[in-house]
Image (cartoon, grey):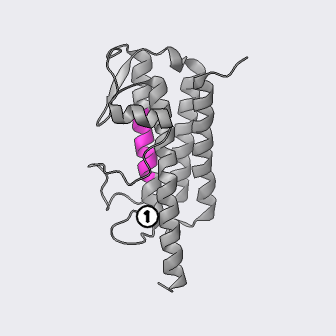
Amino acid sequence: MARTQADILLEQFNSTVDKWISYLDDYTLEMLCQRPNMQSWSLGQVYVHIIADTGFFVEQIKICLLDDRNGNETMHDNAKAMFTRNSFPDMPLTNPSNDLNSKQPASKEELLKGLVLIKNEVNRLYSSHDLSRSTGKTKHPGLQFFNALEWLQFAEMHKRHHFRQKKKIDDQLLILKQRGQ
């Protein structure tokens, strides 16, 4: 049986979540909560952000699967370019809801549980619905309208986009460690 676009997107989604899960083994809670500077999130805050935003994206997938409203609406041209590249732009993005003093994780287990719950929910939705047949769309706050499959792709791209931020945080913390700070 030929793999569909939905199959490929689910595989990419699972792979990206699994990477974030495996990275948890490389850090203590103290390391996850260390901010490299006052203008940067800690890696723990990045995890909290990813889990919260992906939870929102999963809720949008559910709405699209259950409601056919907004089927004729389109995404913003910037979103079209991102989806064509299957990648966010390689630059820091601003989001008014991203507070530099956002919540730190209480434990590594909290982060692991959040990632596993999201992965399981997406896989449950995938096994019980044909995401590619969904005609409903919901509105992204800045990029206009996505259908269920587009929300899945967006969720994966978003998590992958934060790999660059993770590397920058890791690099900055390594420099601080080498300086004895």
Residue 13 sits inside the magenta stretch: no
Q: How many labels were placed on the picture?
A: 1
Q: Nearer the viewer, residue 10 or 93?
A: 93
- Quarter of the image for the N terminus: give it: top right
Query: SS at mark 1?
Result: loop
Which residue shows up at 46% across the image and 43% down it? 158
Seen as rendered, the residue at the extreme bottom is: 180
- Give the residue number, with chain letter if any, for mark 1: 42
Q: Is residue 98 left or right of residue 168?
A: left
Question: Magenta region's main secondary structure?
Answer: helix
The amino acid marked with disc number 1 is Ser
What's the magenta region? 48-57
Q: Nearer the viewer, residue 57 or 70?
A: 70
Seen as rendered, the residue at the extreme right is: 1
Q: Is residue 149 above or below residue 81?
A: above
Q: Position of residue 66 (x, y in %)?
A: 42, 16
Judge whether residue 105 can be spotted in this image. Answer: no
Seen as rendered, the residue at the extreme left is: 96
Q: Is residue 179 left or right of residue 74?
A: right
Which residue shows up at 56% across the image and 67% down it? 28
Judge whether residue 86 can be spotted in this image. Answer: yes
Q: Position of residue 140 (x, y in %)?
A: 33, 33
Q: Nearer the viewer, residue 132 or 55?
A: 132
Q: Position of residue 171 (x, y in %)?
A: 52, 69
Q: Is residue 146 above or below residue 108?
A: above
Q: Quick one: label 1, few (<14), some, or many (20+) residues within 10 Å? A: many
Residue 56 sits inside the magenta stretch: yes
